[in-house]
Image (spheres, helix red, strand yellow):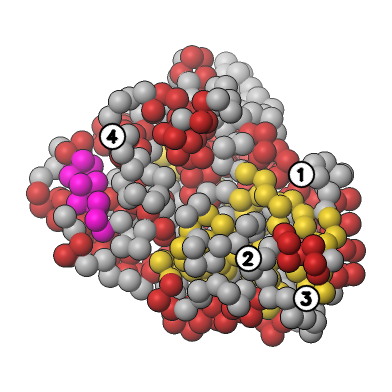
Amino acid sequence: MSASAQDDPTPPPWGARERRSLLQRLTSERPTWDLVVVGAGITGAGIARDAALRGLSVLVIEAQDVAFGTSSRSTRLIHGGVRYLEQREFGLVYEALRERARLYEAAPHLVRPARFLFPAYRGDRLGPWMLRLGLTLYDTLNFHRGQGHDYLDPEATRIAEPMLRAEGLRGAVQYEDAVTDDARLTLAILSDARRHGAEVLTYAKVTGIAGPRGEHVVTLEDGTSIAAKVVTIAAGPWTGPALLGARGEGLLSLSKGTHIVVRSVDAPVRQPLVIQAPEQRRILFVVPWGTRTYLGTTDTAYEGDPGASGVTTEDEDEILDITRRVLPGARLDRDAIVSTWSGVRPLVRAEGAASDDTVELSRKHRIVERDDGVLAIVGGKLTTYRAMSEDIVDDVVARLLVTWPQSRPRPAACSTHTRPLVPGLPLDAHELEDPLLADLVPRHGAAARALAQTGRGTERLVDDLPYRWCEVDHAIAHEGVCHVIDLVRRRLPLVLTDRDQGAGVVREVAMRLVEAGGGTQVDIDAELERYRHEVHVETGRTPGVDALR
Ligand SMILES: Cc1cc2nc3c(=O)[nH]c(=O)nc-3n(C[C@H](O)[C@H](O)[C@H](O)COP(=O)(O)OP(=O)(O)OC[C@H]3O[C@@H](n4cnc5c(N)ncnc54)[C@H](O)[C@@H]3O)c2cc1C
């Protein structure tokens, strides 16, 4: 790709045509890739970007859509993890805070700092003094970058957040962390990997990895075989024996986390809140999200398909009960729920650990190697994806250098510490007064300028949500959308924020997608069926046919 294309904030084209030409290349040219990455969650995306920037040829293979797994089902925080201080995970907190600072620079449109309010009530496990102590340590591990924490007495706490229950309130700490859009962050990383030459094939499940060290053959479900010098598995909670063989036995403990979404008028909090759940020894977050507020998460051991963890009424009730305790004036009943999501944490099981309690398990990552040299990376956090990627790509480069041809330029050093995810000048305050740009920037950064000027479909899809029709066409042409659900769930989180899960607009979206790919009415019907099915699996809701216009 030319230098000017690498500086263009608009992501390179990535639609049906690019997919066809990649498939053609894989079957006719049959290239040998320096690196094949299995999984296009944030970890796989980070590995691909780091490796592509170093000059390696990279192919990412994803069984479903970009960020289909845990990377679109998190609490959407870029944070040091105050809670891990209790587990004395100082190294993890330090690393996550350092990565948070890097993400502020690399993706300011996607990683937005906020003041979090963490109250303490009578009977809570963590009282005001413990919170002050913890946050002092948090600020220290952050090298006192940014605004440090504040302690608020009960009166000041209620001024900061009048929704909080007054009875039993002992005070609060207010501190900085950041909120993101997990799926779009993953997409931005992957788009930048593509900008630097990486290829991504979605809806292609890896069913086997064979061959000796340095000469691996990756087999896809449809029988296609792909040659790779090094293979890294970044399959999150799917990293089990099917991909890792014996090394995958008992490697992970899976833990399910559920979130619910309500309208912000029903839980009008002014800032993200951290709530203690004394019985569960956990904390929950209440996060304002435009005209919505989301609440979560649960933390329960899980077995089964990580892509179909779903949400039960018990999950919903647990979150509603815990939150109602501190926000008595909020309308938090089952009818208030707009949508839900759940994800599965791929936690690395500690060797010889006495407890398998998922609340206590470390969020640190680990690199595992099969006997034939295939690598896998497991655990970690959304926040630490870049450091994890650097770690494993260093290893990949060392392996490749053993047989690196003299005629080829040597791989560059890692450069992801400082490079922006979307090149181009950020928008200034004056530009952000434009309501269209104000809607687009949080998802597109500097690319919003060109998107706003396309002149096509500047209306909102749904009146009280900031998603615009021009984004639908843009996603079809530039964001690797194969199915309607990819677009209305992960490119635009309509399924999570619209009371009808996007049912009112999904037919029009399907028509545009199918038209762009050269399909027929049968394909539109199939898209709508797939959308209905996947929304039901994830949220338990069934978008009604009647709602489809
Ligand atoms: C409820 C919850 C809340 C969380 N909150 C936060 C938070 O606020 N902040 C934070 O920093 N972290 C958070 N995390 C952790 C974070 O979300 C995960 O660590 C991260 O998303 C894991 O990314 P991943 O790429 O490793 O895995 P995934 O995102 O799960 O990606 C793995 C991918 O591999 C694909 N795959 C699987 N098998 C195959 C195959 N055979 N062939 C091809 N592809 C395959 C899957 O389809 C999937 O897309 C949270 C996690 C959960 C569950």
Q: Of helix, strand and loop, which one carries label 2?
A: strand
Camera-side mark, 3 or 4: 3
| Residue 408 in sight here | yes
Under circle 3, the secondary element is strand
The answer for how far apart the CA atoms under marks 4 and 1 are is 40 Å
Left or right of 48 on screen, residue 451 = left
* Dot 4 alpha-carbon crowd within 10 angstroms: few under 14, some 14 to 19, many 20 or more: some
**Most foreground residue, 403 or 477:** 477
Going by the numbered disc 4, the residue's amino acid type is: Gly
Q: Is residue 233 above or below residue 336?
A: above
Q: Which residue is mark 1?
A: 98
Q: For label 3, count other residues whose C-alpha is less than 10 Å away and answer few (under 14), some (14-19) or many (20+).
A: many
Sequence order check, earlier mark of 3 and 1: 1
Left or right of 12, for residue 80: right
Q: What amino acid type is highlighted by mark number 2?
A: Phe
Q: Reading the chain from its start, which is encountered first: label 1 or label 2?
A: 1
Where is residue 449 drawn, in percent x and y?
45, 25
Query: Mark number for residue 400?
Result: none
Q: Which residue is mark 3?
A: 169
Taking 359 as reference, is 220 left or right?
left
Residue that badge 4 annotates: 457
Displayed quadrant of residue 275: bottom right
Residue 285, numbered circle: 2
Dot 1 falls on a residue whose secondary structure is helix
Q: Are marks 2 and 3 in contact (CB under 8 Å)?
A: no
Q: Which residues are magenta?
A: 503-514
Q: Nearer the viewer, mark 1 or mark 2?
A: 2
Q: Quadrant of residue 213?
A: top right
Residue 421 on image: x %, y %: 57, 33
Disc 1 packing (10 Å; few <14; some 14–19; many ≥20): many
- In which quadrant of the rendered image does the C terminus lie? bottom left
